[in-house]
Image: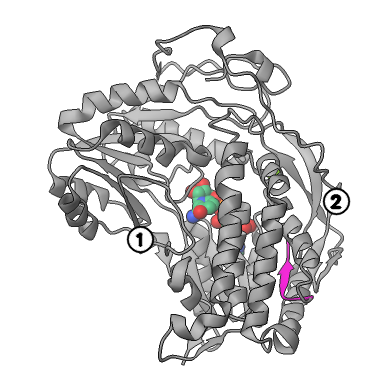
Amino acid sequence: MKRSSKSALKPAVKAVAPSRAVVPLRERRLNFGDKWDYAPAPEDHKGYPIAPRHELFIDGKFVKPRARRYFDSINPATEEKLTEIALADERDVAAAVAAARKAYDGVWGKMPARERGKYLFRIARIIQERSRELAVLETIDGGKPIKESRDIDLPLVAAHFFYYAGWADKLKYAFPGRTPRSLGVAGQIIPWNFPLLMAAWKIAPALACGNTVVLKPAETTSITALRLAEIFQQADLPPGVVNIVTGAGETGAALVRHPGVAKIAFTGSTEVGKLIAKTLAERSNNAPRLTLELGGKAANIVFEDAPIDQAIEGIISGIYFNQGHVCCAGSRLFVQEGIHKTVLRKLRDRIQTLRVGNPLDKNTDIGAINSSAQLKKIRSLVKSGEEQGAVVEQTSCRLPAKGYWFPPTMLTRVSPSHRVAQEEIFGPVLSVMTFRTPEEAIERANNTPYGLSAGVWTDKGSKIFKVAQKLRAGVIWANCYNKFDPASPFGGYKESGFGREGGLHGLAAYCRLD
Ligand code: NAI
Ligand code: MG
C-alpha cells in the first residue's frame, strides 16, 4: 500500500473515504511505519519526448487526416493531455486500404518468404533495442505499472515478432500437404488494455503469411502504435505494408465496411464484436474472414489439496494484473469449502500489501484505470454487487486526487446470479464464491455466457485433466495463471469469440489453405 506521500503523484494525495457498505481490509499486521516503506523509484520519462501532434501512418509516411480533425490522448494517472491524435474518417481509411492493396500487389505478396522473415526479425530486434522507451510510453498513455509494461508486455511483443518471423519461410511445414496462400489486406482493430501486445499479436502473423495491414488502435492508447510505425520506417519496411489509422469506433466501423479488406481481426467488447459480425454477415457475397477475441469472466478454481500460498499469488496476479483490464482475468474465484476461510484470510493480507499509485514507479503493483468511462463502469458494477447483497472489501489505501483509480477490491457473499458473477467488470475486482465437489465447480464455472479462460489449482494431475476437459474455456492454466507464450494459441468459446491467435492456429487465421 502506498503510505509514503513522497512517492505519490502530484498533486498531493488525498484519502478517499470508502463508502459505508465497504468493509476495509485489516491494516497490515507488520506495520513498521514510513521508514520501512520503499523509497520512490519513478522511471525517468524525460528522455522519451512525445510530439504535440500525431498524424496517420499511410503508405510509409505520416500524413494529416483529410478532415484535419484531432482528438486528445491523456495520461490516465494525471489527467494531463499528452498529445493530439489524428482522427481518421472514411476517406483516410480508404487511402490506407488502397496503400495496403498496392503494397500487397506490388511488393509484399510477391516477395520471397525468407525476405519477409528478415523484415520481421529486424522489427523484433529494433523493438528490443527500443523496449525501454516503448514501455515508458505504454505506461504513460495507458496507466499500467511500469514493471508490467517493462517485464511482461514488451518482452512478449518482441517474442511475437521473433516467433512469426521464424515461420515466414516455413509455412508449408506448418500445414503439411497444403498450400498456404496469403489473403490480401487485413483490417485489424485492437483495444486499449495491451496496446502494443495486441498490435504484435495481429501484425506479426499477418505479415509472416504475406498479407498487408491496416491497423486501428484504441482511441485512448494510440501513441505506442505510432511509435511502432516509426520502427517500421527504421526497419525499411516497404511503404504500405502496415498502415495505421487512428480514431474511435467510427474509424473502426469504416474499416469493417471497406470492401477492399479480405480479413477482419478484432479484439474488444462482446457488444462491438457482435456488431462487426452482423455488418459482415450482411455482405454475404464478398464478406471478409473474421476472427473475434471478446470478453471473459474466467473461473479460477482452487481445490482443498492445492498449494495454497502459490494459489494466493496466482489469484492475485490473475485479477489484479494490469488493474484487471484483462479479458482472461481470473475474475471469479471458486474456493472449495474446506479452505474457504484460510484462503480469504490469506487473500486479505496479501491484497493489503498491494501498492496503488504512480504507474511509472517501479514499486507500483496497481496503476491507473485506463479511462474515466472504464472507471465509471467498474464503479457501477461494484455498486450493483453491493445492492444485490455482496460484501465489498477494499484496501484502506490512499488514492491520488487526480487521475482514474480504483482500489483492489474483493467481493464476498457473491451469489451466481449477481451481476458481478455474470458480467465482465474489467477492473481490479474479484468475486469470491465456494463449491463442494469438482462437479459443482465445473458447472458453476461454465455458467456464464463467456468461455475464454480458466484456472485450476490442485495437487493432483488427474484432477487437473478431469476438470480441464469439462471446462468450456479456450485457455486453461493449471497451478499458474496469466502465463503467455507466442507458441501457444489463445481464444475463446461462446460469447468470448472465435478463432485463435498465437502459435500455428494464429497462422491459419491469415492464410487460405488450398
Ligand atoms: P470497444 O469494443 O468499444 O473497443 C475496442 C476497439 O474497437 C477500439 O479500438 C474501438 O475504437 C473499436 N470500436 C468501437 N466501436 C466500433 C465499431 N462499431 N466498429 C469497429 N470498431 C469499433 O471496448 P471499450 O468500449 O473500450 O470497452 C468496453 C468493455 O469492453 C470493457 O469494459 C471490457 O469489458 C470490454 N473489453 C474487452 C477487451 C478484450 O480484450 N476482450 C478489450 C477492451 C474492452
Ligand atoms: Mg491515453
Q: Which residue is mark 2?
A: 53
Q: Nearer the viewer, residue 297 or 163?
A: 163
The dominant secondary structure in magenta is loop
Q: Earlier in the sequence, mark 2 or mark 1?
A: 2
Q: Is residue 240 magenta?
A: yes
Q: In the rendered image of this protein, does residue 4 appear above or below residue 266?
A: above
| Badge 1 density bin: few <14, some 14–19, many ≥20, Cα 10 Å | many
Residue 513 coordinates in the image, percent (x, y): 46, 88
Asked if residue 508 can be seen in this view, the reply is: yes
Quarter of image, res 116: bottom right
| Badge 2 density bin: few <14, some 14–19, many ≥20, Cα 10 Å | some
Asked if residue 394 can be seen in this view, the reply is: no
Left or right side of 343 for 230:
right
SS of the residue under disc 2:
strand
Q: Is residue 47 magenta?
A: no
In this picture the colour scheme is one colour
Residue 149 coordinates in the image, percent (x, y): 60, 44
Q: Which mark is residue 474?
A: 1
The residue that appears at 69% across and 72% down in the rendered structure is: 119
The residue that appears at 42% across and 64% down in the rendered structure is: 489
Amino acid beneath label 1? Gly
Extent of the magenta region: 239-246
SS of the residue under disc 1:
loop
Residue 3 coordinates in the image, percent (x, y): 57, 14
Measured Cα–Cα span from mark 2 to mark 1: 40 Å
Write down which quadrant ligand 1 falls in: bottom right
Q: In the rendered image of this protein, does residue 118 appear above or below residue 132?
A: below
The residue that appears at 62% across and 80% down in the rendered structure is: 211
Amino acid beneath label 2? Arg
Residue 334 coordinates in the image, percent (x, y): 26, 39
